[in-house]
Image (spheres, rainbow, N blue to C red):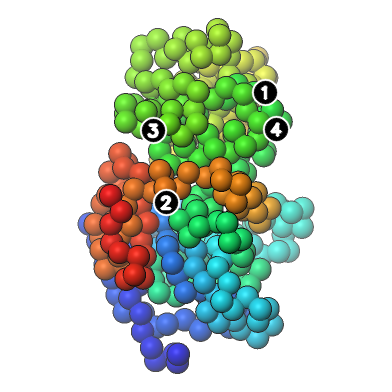
Amino acid sequence: MGTSATMRQVRVAGLNDVTVVDSPVPEAGPDQVRVAVTYAGICGSDTHAIAGHHPFLHPPYLPGHELCGVVDRVGAGADPSLVGKRVVVRPNVECGECVNCRAGRINACQQLAWIGCDSSGKLAGGMAAYVVAPARNIIPVPDEVSDLDAALVECLATPVHAARIAGDLRGANVTVLGAGTVGILCVVAARAAGAATIVVTDLEPAKRERALKLGADAAVDAADPQFAMAVRRAYDGGHADVVFDCVATEVSIRQAFDVLRRAGTLLVVGVPPRAGSVPLPEVQDWEMRIQGCANYTAADMQTAIAIAAAGGLPSEQIVSTVFAVEEAAAAFVAAANGSVGKILVTPRSDLGTHRG
């Protein structure tokens, strides 16, 4: 396939400006791999960006950083045995040379770039037939991981990373604020890490009900006037040891402090829509830990794959709809709704356009 060939590619400029354009089919350069895309997910970062609420990602860009597919070609220096393998793509591209990269914290690379989250247009995403990535960012998936599972691996890797840096969760009381896709995957990650009791909170009854079906021990209305008491009731009057905040607003931060024990840990997992204040007196006097959680390492993605391979990723119940690339505008509107499950986009006509 020569460089003159074109493919249909999703371009995002805003909520009401999602289009499908003709783009050149990319070629794999040195140490690169080309992947024929199976699925690409719409992330909360995407919905924040198109609404103008993301602090760092600004349209226009070529989306699709949650993706899986089959290796189609490899460039010079890349492993030729990858051709034909089912893979996931790690979209965070590190420099490999900064102090954080040298320490193994590639998720905190000083020069971090993103496939599918790049306003410069240099790192096009996977909402297209093909995507190119560095060979080191390609991770094969075992046969027991379905394509649907593989499409959620990147999304799961962030909660896996958050659970890892939270510390030892074995036997812990965990609260997850927000029961969207990332919140549900925080339940999956926390359970895999050994959490004892997991409480999920959300404003929407349907989301709370889904959280209970997918592994939470209790679900609490985030608008409950007796919110803290309702959460603590699930811990027999105790407190949360760890809170995963997937909402990341001043209100949710306050709720986290209302349920955390002294010397507890608050993990900020969601993308904050704006700057806000934190209760500094409690941070100091209660010796609280507030931990930012930004993406993942290659090891976190491998852990996410292992969870999926062990049957711990309920992808059939998380993914609600699969849209064709040509239906990208409708897909982004559905994802922005927030009440539905995970939305995927596929360039493959054999996968159909809708699941349910």
Q: Are there few (<14), some (14-19), or many (20+) residues within 10 Å of tag 2?
A: many
> What residue is shown with label 1?
171
> What residue is shown with label 3?
210
Circle 1 sits in a helix, a strand or a loop, which is it? loop
Amino acid under label 2?
Answer: Cys
Q: Is residue 142 visible?
A: yes
Relative to 54, does residue 203 appear above or below in the rendering?
above
Circle 3 sits in a helix, a strand or a loop, which is it? helix
342 left or right of 30?
left
Give percent across and percent down for residue 356. Answer: 28, 49
Q: Which residue is drawn at 39% across and 83% down?
A: 24
> What residue is shown with label 2?
43
Q: How far is disc 1 from disc 4 in space, using C-alphas? A: 12 Å
Q: Are there few (<14), some (14-19), or many (20+) residues within 10 Å of tag 3?
A: some
Q: Are there few (<14), some (14-19), or many (20+) residues within 10 Å of tag 1?
A: few
Nearest to viewer (mark 1 / mark 2) = 1
Which quarter of the image is occupied by the N terminus?
bottom left
> What residue is shown with label 4?
167
Q: How far is disc 1 from disc 2 in space, using C-alphas? A: 30 Å
Q: How far is disc 3 from disc 4 in space, using C-alphas? A: 27 Å
Mark 3 and mark 1 lie on one chain; the one further toward the N terminus is 1
Amino acid under label 3?
Answer: Arg
Relative to 274, does residue 279 appear above or below in the rendering?
above
Nearest to viewer (mark 3 / mark 2) = 3
Amino acid under label 1?
Answer: Gly
Circle 4 sits in a helix, a strand or a loop, which is it? loop
Mark 1 and mark 2 lie on one chain; the one further toward the N terminus is 2
Q: Residue at x 50, y 10 (%)?
A: 233
Whether the residues at callouts 3 and 1 have beta carbons within 8 Å, the answer is: no
